[in-house]
């Protein structure tokens, strides 16, 4: 095993494998051991070969720091285990189902059981360590259930519903800053409690909800979360996340977009990458369109064709006749083609075929494949 300089794991692994491809006689294999952040394994028959493999590489200290493992002990020394997906920040994740979270809680007594109410929810991954992940999520707060009756003497039922935490609670500084963002008062997005709550500072910028009891004492809300306004925050094991890549839904992104915008402008929420949200919209919501594509859309009751000049969140800027620019919802535009356009098939059985459009029928185009010298039919949505 060879010691590497801090933070060079991926670069060292890439460089050694690149050299190994050029000179395969120097080693049998190069790999990173599970949990070993400062060491890389090189399986070779000769020490001189290892030195030659690492010569002049700046990611290793010179002289090389080596820990030798006898070949007969290597399998017992290395404890192999399944490695889940690599977690990066910022990124999106989705929590496991409630039954799966309960099973994890039964095995780990230190795990925060408050996270149960967020089962299946989309989460914003704000950071991670080797064993835990830092999550931000749209809080689930008690919202009155409307039953059509307005009886003040009847105790209203509530349901834990996704709402961003209203930053005006108990903070006069935020109350002065917030009025310019009038849309933050939308009760379908921001929480408007029917009784008085306060925000108690735990350790800035972390808050906790409190309310007054019958003796006018402030007590933490039972089962309440910790907040970095306007989101609830958790540090939990990696295992709470589903293994597959999370694909955000449009209505979920709207809540996060509102929270990240207000959080970054008015509150103390630190946004790691301001372009991350835009990237998410372009890749998951407006993925059917890209800048420079020819599209058509209903503009003022008239179908017009143009070229996409820009994409911002869920809105595209459409340039019509090289003069007029119109902003329109990305969901209401569709691609169109003309004979002679060069296209590439990105879906279905003809994946990655490229060619020229030779004919257009309703919802379908015929493409002449340049490599195979044959005609391919596919729907417009597959190109």
Image (cartoon, helix red, strand yellow):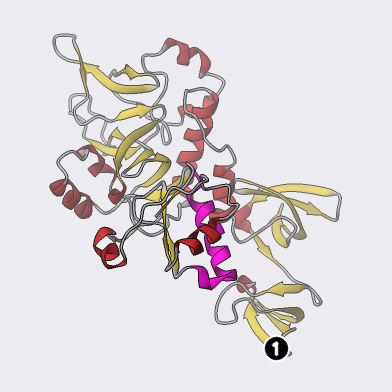
Q: Is residue 333 left or right of residue 240?
A: right
Residue 151 visible within the image: yes
Q: Can you say which quadrant of the picture contains the N terminus? A: bottom left
Q: Is residue 26 above or below residue 309?
A: below
Point out residue 122 in the picture as x, y percentages from the top left corner: 38, 47
Q: Residue at x 72, y 85 (%)?
A: 371
Q: Is residue 102 left or right of residue 272?
A: left
As for residue 12 lying within the magenta part, the answer is yes
Q: Is residue 230 above or below residue 129?
A: above
Q: Specify the farthest residue to the bottom.
A: 374
Task: Provide the secondary structure element on which disc 1 rests.
Answer: loop
Quarter of the figure with residue 274: top right
Q: Residue at x 70, y 88 (%)?
A: 372
The residues colored magenta run: 7-26
Q: Name the foreground residue: 105 vs 5.
A: 5
Q: Residue at x 46, y 14 (%)?
A: 175
As for residue 227 lying within the magenta part, the answer is no
Q: Is residue 56 left or right of residue 230?
A: right
Most prominent secondary structure in the magenta stretch? helix
Characterize the local packing of mark 1: few (<14), some (14-19) or many (20 or more) Cα atoms within 10 angstroms: few
Point out residue 358 in the picture as x, y percentages from the top left corner: 77, 82
Point out residue 34 in the picture as x, y percentages from the top left corner: 34, 55
Q: Name the foreground residue: 310 vs 332.
A: 310
Q: Is residue 343 left or right of residue 60?
A: right
Point out residue 93 in the picture as x, y percentages from the top left corner: 40, 49
Quarter of the figure with residue 344: bottom right
Q: Name the foreground residue: 74 vs 137.
A: 74
Q: Badge 1 is on which residue?
A: 372
């Amino acid at each position: 095993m060879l010691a590497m300089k801090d933070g060079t794991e991926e670069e060292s692994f890439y460089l050694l494998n690149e050299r190994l491809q050029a000179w395969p006689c120097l080693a049998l294999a190069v790999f990173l051991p599970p949990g070993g952040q400062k060491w890389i394994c090189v399986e070779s028959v000769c020490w001189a070969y290892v030195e030659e493999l690492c010569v002049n590489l700046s990611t290793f200290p010179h002289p090389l720091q080596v820990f030798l493992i006898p070949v007969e002990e290597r399998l017992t020394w290395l404890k192999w285990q399944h490695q889940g997906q690599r977690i990066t920040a910022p990124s999106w994740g989705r929590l496991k189902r409630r039954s799966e979270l309960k099973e994890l809680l039964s095995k780990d007594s230190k795990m925060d059981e408050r996270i149960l109410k967020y089962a299946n929810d989309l989460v914003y991954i704000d950071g991670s360590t080797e064993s835990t992940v830092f999550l931000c999520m749209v809080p689930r707060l008690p919202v009155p259930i409307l039953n059509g009756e307005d009886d003040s003497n009847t105790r209203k039922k509530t349901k834990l519903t996704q709402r961003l935490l209203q930053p005006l609670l108990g903070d006069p500084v935020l109350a002065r800053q917030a009025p310019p963002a009038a849309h933050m008062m939308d009760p379908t997005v921001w929480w408007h409690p029917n009784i008085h709550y306060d925000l108690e500072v735990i350790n800035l910028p972390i808050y906790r909800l409190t309310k007054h009891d019958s003796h006018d004492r402030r007590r933490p809300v039972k089962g309440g979360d910790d907040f970095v306004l306007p989101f609830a925050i958790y540090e939990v094991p990696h295992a709470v996340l589903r293994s597959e890549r999370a694909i955000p839904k449009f209505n979920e992104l709207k809540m996060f977009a509102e929270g990240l915008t207000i959080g970054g402008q008015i509150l103390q929420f630190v946004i790691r990458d301001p372009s991350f949200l835009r990237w998410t919209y372009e890749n998951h919501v407006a993925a059917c369109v890209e800048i420079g594509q020819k599209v058509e859309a209903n503009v003022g009751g008239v179908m017009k064709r143009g070229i996409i000049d820009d994409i911002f969140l869920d809105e595209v800027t459409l340039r019509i006749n090289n003069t007029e620019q119109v902003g329109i919802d990305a969901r209401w535009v569709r691609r169109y083609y003309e004979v002679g356009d060069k296209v590439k098939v990105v879906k279905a059985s003809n994946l990655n075929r490229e060619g020229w459009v030779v004919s257009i029928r309703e919802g379908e185009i015929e493409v002449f494949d340049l490599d195979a010298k044959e005609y391919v039919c596919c729907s417009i949505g597959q190109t």
